[in-house]
Image: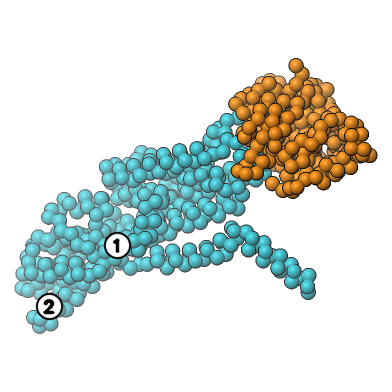
Chain colours: A cyan, B orange
Amino acid sequence: MKQFLSFVQKEFYHIFRDVRSMLILLAMPIIQIILFGFAITTEVRNVQVAVLDFSKDISTQQIIHRLQESEYFTVSEISHPDEIDRIFKKGQANLVLVFGNHFHDNLLHTGEASLQMIADASEPNQASTLVNYATSILGLYRQELMREYQMPFQIRPEVRMLYNPQMKSAYYFVPGVMGLILMLICAMMTSIAIVREKETGTMEVLLASPIRPLYIILAKMVPYFTLSIVNLITILLLAVFVLKVPIAGNLVLLALLSLLFIIVALSLGLLISNIVDTQVAAILVSGMGLMMPTMILSGMVFPIESMPPVLQGLSTVLPARWYIAAVKKLMVQGVDGVFVIKEFVLLAFMAAVLLAVSLRKFKIRLQ
Amino acid sequence: MNTVIETKNLTKQFGDFTAVDRISFSVKKGEIFGFLGANGAGKTTAMRMLCGLSKPTSGQGFVAGFDIARQTEAVKKSIGYMSQKFSLYEDLTVKENIRLFAGIYGVKEKTILPKMEETLSTLGLSNEKNSLVKALPLGWKQKLAFSVAIFHEPQIVFLDEPTGGVDPITRRHFWELIYEATERGITVFVTTHYMDEAEYCNRLSIMVDGRIDALDTPAHLRAQFRAETMDEVFRKLARKATRTEI
């Protein structure tokens, strides 16, 4: 019995003296609870809504006022139908309401008026939530009118789901999966592969040989680079032919964007392999530091707009966020190159910084 | 002009800690030079500096006539290195490992194949050339690792505790390979803490707390310390050590 207890004690020492085990056991659950608690929300808040109002009468003004007052929406007005497409592609609105002419007159004289609701359904869950909220605000307004005039009124919203008319969630998760898989292969696997050599001692033999350290690293990156391109093609083929998600935009731009993202992920992997010395640590750092935030904060699963500001801020440093956003625009919305300049520039900047830092840090000498 | 390794006051500091403290020695061509010391005495650090893996804090060192602080590329080309941990790839075959390292050291393509056959038959591994290295017994792996380290005929080969974990008989076989290499003019610089291995060396240096406390042939060292065996010599010196681990 005494032997057994001293063994139990020894096992506790193993855990308490290992920072990594402590992190998994204590910090990981906390981080997960916090992230999930805040990020999993179907609630929408302060979503950009644009209104195209041809009537500009008392009813439409009152409806707009009500939308404005609700905490869900931030309303802006547009004046021409041509603007609708542009603000969607720029991501300046997720929902557009269009009131036709004589809304108030129609409502009073025929008891019926209709309006158009256009939602950006490349994020299907958010789109339907937005439409539901807007519809219920219209419903409340209708009830007030009926009390006031003692007459039955009908307001018919005519809903259009833009970019993803069948509300397929595949449209939504394909870009996310692309980001995640590329991150997994390039960053996680590369870092593990490099660290494995440190662990087995072969890295020391390589460093003592006349081969240049840069070549050791490049040689490590090539297979993962190749693999990720194969994966990218596979995902796209599956998306198009199995999930029936068309590639609406420019394939060349999509390929260029993906190459850029792969470079970012590879440099992240290299950076990780410089920091840690064991494979376990490499898995942990890439898992906790890259995969989990990518999954939760990049907009892959949960809409970024609905996150609390702190997490929104955090998500801006994730390369996957920008990659996924740009892939969505290029693949699902089919936008022109000009609409993804921001993402391209940000990813290029991240690639340059990460590559410079990690190559600099790569130790030519072991000490 | 037969000196292939020479150091003058070679020193390595990590912060306040002096791992290697002003060591000076020289090794002649074709010699088997034993580098002894307790764990933490600084022998691995000293060896890493000589191999161009670690930059000296002060002092000088020349390996194969090249400055270890400034001409690391040239140093690396003239040496072979076998690390303390197993230095071959377990998931590659015997043949693949030889080809890989021969390629890294720039051995000419047409000399690789005949030399590989020769090496494999010396080792008695001809039938195993397509086996994965991990399937080989430890003693064979170490012999293979040594053969790979000298495959490109370096001037000097550095062996960092090459025979860890094997029995004295296997160690004896390993040393037969070392003697063969020295007959071809390769200088062997070896760290060890097996005293039977120490006896096989031409000259020995014993490091204590980062300094070289003794340097001579095994016979002279035994006489100097009035000891029966190298083990006794080593223990007399190691007792003075004040530090244990790095």
Residue A271, percent from left and from top: 51, 44
Q: Quadrant of the C terminus of chain A?
A: top right
Residue A253, percent from left and from top: 34, 40
Dividing the picture into quadrants, the one containing residue B37 is top right
Residue B208, percent from left and from top: 77, 41
Residue at the right extreme? Answer: B228
Residue at the top extreme? Answer: B1
Tell me which residue sits at (44%, 54%) in the image. Answer: A294
Residue A145's mark?
Answer: 2
Task: Tell whether B95 sits left or right of A186.
Answer: right
Residue B7 visible? The answer is yes
Near mark 2 (Cα within 10 A), the count class, few <14, some 14-19 or many ≥20, is: some
Which residue bears the numbered disc 1?
Answer: A127
Q: Earlier in the sequence, mark 1 or mark 2?
A: 1
Residue B96 visible? The answer is no
Tell me which residue sits at (90%, 32%) in the image. Answer: B219
Given the image, on which type of amino acid does mark 2 rest? Answer: Leu
Tell me which residue sits at (27%, 42%) in the image. Answer: A338
Given the image, on which type of amino acid does mark 1 rest? Answer: Ala
